[in-house]
Structures are given as structure tokens and as C-alpha cells.
């Protein structure tokens, strides 16, 4: 019998659907890794977001054959040295376009229109009427042109922005005025009114957004991060924000999450923070379950070549 382990705060939701679709499989549910103190040596399949995943835990799954990430990113799993090369890894790539593009626009407007100041004015019952600046006519640079990055660029183009994409595999995409290789990041950062990071936390992207990139940006520009915190040199960003090197930042992801109460980001007036809400939507399970069900059908039938979003590694 195939044993499926689901680790998530909403494991019961996924478990209920899978039991109805696949009554012959064994399902174990847990909200956190800490709950799983027993023997897991017979687990065939792991469903999880991977946040907090440890190498020690992966080592306990001696029969593991397949990991279905509940997220687009799989870096939490791939960082585990004990993950055997034969274990199949699949993602939910393709479902995040709508929530992530909306998150990016939310962050852009929050920093561009100084949402914290307006909230303070409301609390103080103060009619604080000041000019705000259009997105239309501005330049957006989007780093990371997968499904999400492409969707972001196309939406920003609809706002009347000039959109430049950065990719390690530059190619023409609808909605982008220009596409350039990632190694030209510093050059195009200087053109950006909004520099938007959608990059995954892979080795080649670690601290890619460094002091040199922020120094290249215009003092009137904003940095938006919905990719991974590990892609940013946070000390360099903090120094730049404190010095007024850029106008501000809208940040949804950080190197350490939850963001520690002692982080300087909390107190910077030109920073707008959301607690990794990019894909944290009410409709998430509705979007992800079709991929999980399709992949489970293929896996149980022995047709792994037909599974969706197989990660090459």
C-alpha cells in the first residue's frame, strides 16, 4: 500500500480530498515536522511546502520515492544532502501567476503611495492629502521570467509601464518591451523605477541583489521582493534604505522567516512589509489539488513520465 505523508497546517484539507479520490492509499497527516516522532521508514510520498525541512527528517524517509511540493519553489528540499537522486520531485508551478502578480502590484502601490503614512493619518483622524505618482509611464524591471514573472510583466504593461525582463534564457515574451540576460542586472537596475525580484533561492542567485545593484538604482526607485530572501544582501539593502539611496522597498520575503522582531526592516519608514503572503490565498487548495490528483494518478499507475512539473536536478 502506498503511504502518503502530508505535512502542512492544512494537511486535513489535502488528506480529505486524497482519501476520496484514492481510497486504497494510506495517508498520514501532520501540521508540523515536530509531530512526527514515530517510524516513517515506509513513507513513499511526501506532500509539503518544505519550509523548515531538515536533512535529518529526509533521512528518516528511507522508502521515499516522490516529493510533491505544495509550492512552486523546491529549494527547501533540494538543499537536503540526504535527498537521494532517484527521488522524484514535482512542484505546483503554474498556479501562482494570478496571486503573485496581484501581490506585486499591491506592494508597488503601497510603497509608491506611502500606505503607512496614510494608515497613520487615518489613526490620527488627520486629512493628509498629498500628491501620488502614476505607475503609467514608469519603467519596471522584472528579474525571473518564469510563469509568474511573465504574468507580472504582462499586467504591468497593462498599466502603461515600460517593462524590461531579466532571464538567464532571454526570449521574446508578450508584454515585455525588452528582454536581457541576468548578468546585465546592474545595468538595467539603473533604468528601473521599480526593480522586481521573482527569482528562486538557487545557488546562482544567492545575494544576487547586492550593494552594487542597489547603488546602481535611482534615488527615486523602489525595490520589490516576492522571490526569495536568500537572493538579497539584506545588510546592503538596509544600508541603502537608511542612506536614501532608493526611495523605498516592498518586501514579502526575507532570509529569516518569520522576520525577527529585532530586524531593522520593521522600523524603516520607507519599507512596506507583508509576511510572505504572495501565494497565501483562500483559494490555494482549489488551485493546487488538480495538479496533485493528476500526479497521484500517474504515480500510482507507474507512469511517472506523465507527471506534471517534474523538477530536473
Image (cartoon, rainbow, N blue to C red):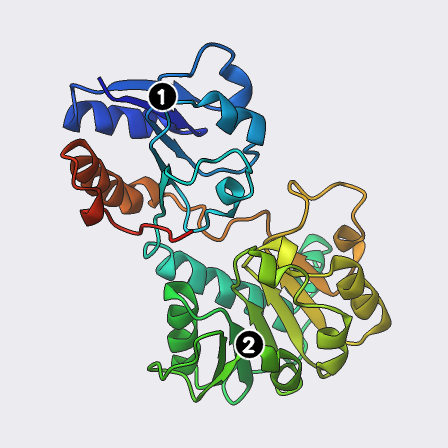
The residue singled out by tag 2 in the image is 182
Tell me where residue 178 appears, x and y as whole percent.
46, 88
Please state which of residues 241 and 113 is positioned toward the viewer in this rendering: 241
Q: Position of residue 150 (x, y in %)?
A: 39, 72
Instruction: Check residue 43 in the rendering and tell me which mark sits there, or answer none.
Output: 1
Position above or below: 171 against 128:
below
Residue 26 as seen in the image, left or right of residue 185: left
Q: Is residue 246 visible?
A: no
**Other-residue count near label 2 (Cα within 10 Å), few / some / many at <14 / 14–19 / ≥20:** some
Where residue 131 sits, quadrant-wise, is bottom right
Residue at (21%, 20%) from the top-left corner? 25
Residue 125 percent location from the top left of the image = 70, 57
Dot 1, crowdedness within 10 Å: few (<14), some or many (≥20)?
many
Residue pictured at 73% horizontal, 61% vertical: 233
**Image quadrant for the N terminus?**
top left
Residue 101, above or below 221: above
Residue plotted at (40% across, 57% down): 99
Residue in the foreground of this view, choosing between 186 and 183:
183
Q: Residue at x 16, y 25 (%)?
A: 22
Nearer-N-terminus badge (1/2): 1
CA–CA distance in space, label 1 to label 2: 40 Å
Amino acid at each position: 500500500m502506498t503511504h502518503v505523508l502530508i505535512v502542512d497546517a492544512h494537511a486535513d484539507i489535502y488528506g480529505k480530498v486524497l482519501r476520496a479520490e484514492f481510497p486504497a492509499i494510506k495517508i498520514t497527516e501532520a501540521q508540523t515536522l515536530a509531530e512526527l516522532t514515530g517510524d516513517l521508514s515506509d513513507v513513499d510520498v511526501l506532500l509539503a511546502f518544505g519550509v523548515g525541512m531538515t536533512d535529518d527528517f529526509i533521512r528518516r524517509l528511507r522508502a521515499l520515492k516522490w516529493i510533491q511540493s505544495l509550492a512552486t519553489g523546491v529549494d527547501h528540499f533540494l538543499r537536503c544532502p540526504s535527498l537521494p537522486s532517484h527521488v522524484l520531485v514535482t512542484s505546483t508551478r503554474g498556479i501562482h501567476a494570478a496571486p503573485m502578480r496581484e501581490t506585486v502590484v499591491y506592494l508597488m502601490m503601497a510603497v509608491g503611495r506611502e500606505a503607512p503614512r496614510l494608515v497613520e493619518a487615518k489613526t490620527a483622524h488627520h486629512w493628509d492629502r498629498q500628491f501620488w505618482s502614476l505607475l503609467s509611464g514608469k519603467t519596471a524591471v522584472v528579474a525571473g521570467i518564469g510563469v509568474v514573472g511573465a504574468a507580472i510583466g504582462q499586467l504591468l504593461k497593462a498599466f502603461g509601464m515600460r517593462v524590461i525582463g531579466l532571464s538567464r534564457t532571454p526570449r521574446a515574451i508578450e508584454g515585455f518591451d525588452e528582454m536581457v540576460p541576468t548578468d546585465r542586472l546592474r545595468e538595467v537596475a539603473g533604468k528601473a523605477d521599480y526593480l522586481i525580484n521573482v527569482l528562486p533561492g538557487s545557488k546562482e542567485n544567492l545575494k544576487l541583489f547586492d550593494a552594487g545593484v542597489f547603488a546602481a538604482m535611482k534615488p527615486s526607485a523602489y525595490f520589490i521582493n516576492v522571490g526569495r530572501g536568500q537572493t538579497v544582501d539584506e545588510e546592503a539593502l538596509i544600508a541603502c534604505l537608511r542612506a536614501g539611496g532608493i526611495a523605498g522597498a516592498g518586501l514579502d520575503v526575507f532570509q529569516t522567516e518569520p522576520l525577527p522582531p529585532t530586524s531593522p526592516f520593521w522600523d524603516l519608514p520607507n519599507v512596506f512589509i507583508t509576511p510572505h503572503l504572495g501565494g497565501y490565498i483562500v483559494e490555494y487548495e482549489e488551485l493546487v489539488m488538480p495538479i496533485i490528483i493528476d500526479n497521484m494518478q500517474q504515480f500510482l499507475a507507474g507512469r511517472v513520465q506523465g507527471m506534471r512539473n517534474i523538477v530536473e536536478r
